[in-house]
Image (cartoon, grey):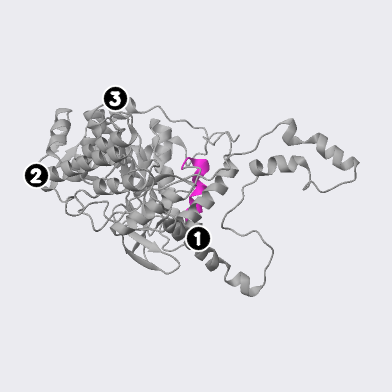
Amino acid sequence: MITGDLWKLHDDATIRRIDDAAVRLLVKGGCRIGHEGLLDMLEGAGCRIERPGSRCYFTEKLVREAVEHLGGRSSDGVAAPASWNPQRVLHHGGSYPHLLDWPSGRRRLATTQDLIDMARMAHVLDEVASVGKVLTDSEANPRIEPLSSTVQLAEITDKPIRGGEVFYADNIEPLVRMGEVITGNTGDTSLVAGCDFFTAPLTLDGDQAECFLAKRRFGMANVPGTMPISGISSPVTIAGTVAVAVAELTAGWVLGYVVDPDLPAGGIVSTGSLDMRTASACFGSPEAMLQDVATVQICRRLHGITVRAATGYVDCKRPGLEAAFQKLYPLVGAPLGTGLFPSGGGLLSAGQDYSPVQHMLDAEMKEAVGRFWGAFEVSEDTIAVDLIEKMMKGDRTNFLDTDHTLRHFRSEQWRPRWFERTLWQGRSAETGAESRMLERIDRYCKDAVRRYERPDVDPNRTAELRRILEAAEREILGGSVTSAASPGRRV
């Protein structure tokens, strides 16, 4: 088992300067909040409000009081797994707008059929533990797309279902009701993504504010998110961008404290940097990594609040070497508290694309890292002194044919599914090896879609989900459209 304290980026006095700057931004510069109800609550808590600009100037007393109340729950220790599970387990989720087919290179806005096919794939593959809404259905009405997609998934699989991003507050209650139907748990919020992102610098727009309030009504933890891009929406300097990120997270915590001080607090940070040559926002750059690490450390070390770095949000556009580098690079921050595993299953192009081929590669890399963090068992049997002595006395050097090897090799060794472990196979074989690997993965994913057979899904559950969807459509859209275009029409 791996244990120990996390490394520190700068001393406490240095990072406190950034935290003090973040508080100053909230007190002197203010935060735009596009919601009159929230502004009224903040005004009642002592903040100064400029109504024409929807700007709130927080008081330092309120900021310090909120952070002190919510903090104190983070640990400085490494939370590595106590053991390793050789069984492949991956999850399906993300809400990405495009599907990238590889190696063909075809990229398109996701259709209803794409959503169905990816759910079928996830249902068939034994290693996928839950089926999620990895794609945003461009053919569905965006005002109710999370709801119609949930019905689609529930008609396709009997595995656990994961939700995705929600951009309209009036979707949240129906999603909770759907979650109750699917899981049987009262007040189930598993279909609702928990984070509420600010728009840098220091803006919470009206729709996001409405979602924020709706989530609090259902008792969801207060998890603000921050995504400033140095050189565009925040200063080009790392310290300046970190100040903006910490200020946005702190603003979110204060809002949650004012609305319901008893709800737990967390946070997500995924900063970027502007590439001055291409004018592209880069979320997988070393500067972005430093910004994320600094934000995580300030929140943990000074306030005891756990903030997660969304390190899987990277810029690579296609499966291959660059994607592998960008997905694994964030692990340099693991000793600093950014997370122990590569993330972003199937994510490409900074969250714009989902690739099932990349998802399988991401899972392979995650499994390898998981094997390392799982350490190893130490016992008389695994040390195997008796066996080693027996082999030496018998003048034997090959442990391959021993019962000990047969008994332990599956639990001790990680075995890749896609990466090759062979000797040099010749120039023609090696120069095309990566392309052939990607083609094998592509066939594996598409074969899963072809092999899909619809499980015995509870018809009463499906009927109740449809009832919730139709009621939401009448409420949100002013009429029901499912009778003409059933969500299950292609399942």
The x, y position of residue 167, in whole percent, is 23, 46
The residue that disc 2 covers is: 52
Q: Secondary structure at mark 1?
A: helix
N-term-proximal mark, 2 vs 3: 2
Q: Is 334 within the magenta?
A: yes
The x, y position of residue 344, in whole percent, is 42, 50
Please rate how many residues cluster around mark 2, counting C-alpha atoms within 10 Å: few if below 14, some from 14 to 19, many from 20: few
181 versus 353 height, above or below: above
Q: Which residue occupies the foreground of this view, 196 or 156?
A: 156
| Magenta-tinted stretch | 327-338
What amino acid type should be assigned to the residue bearing mark 2?
Pro
The residue that disc 3 covers is: 262
Number of the label disc, if any, that sits on residue 441: 1
What amino acid type should be assigned to the residue bearing mark 1?
Ile
Residue found 65% across the figure and 46% down from its top:
413
In this picture, residue 381 sits left or right of residue 1: right
Q: Is 64 within the magenta?
A: no
N-term-proximal mark, 1 vs 2: 2
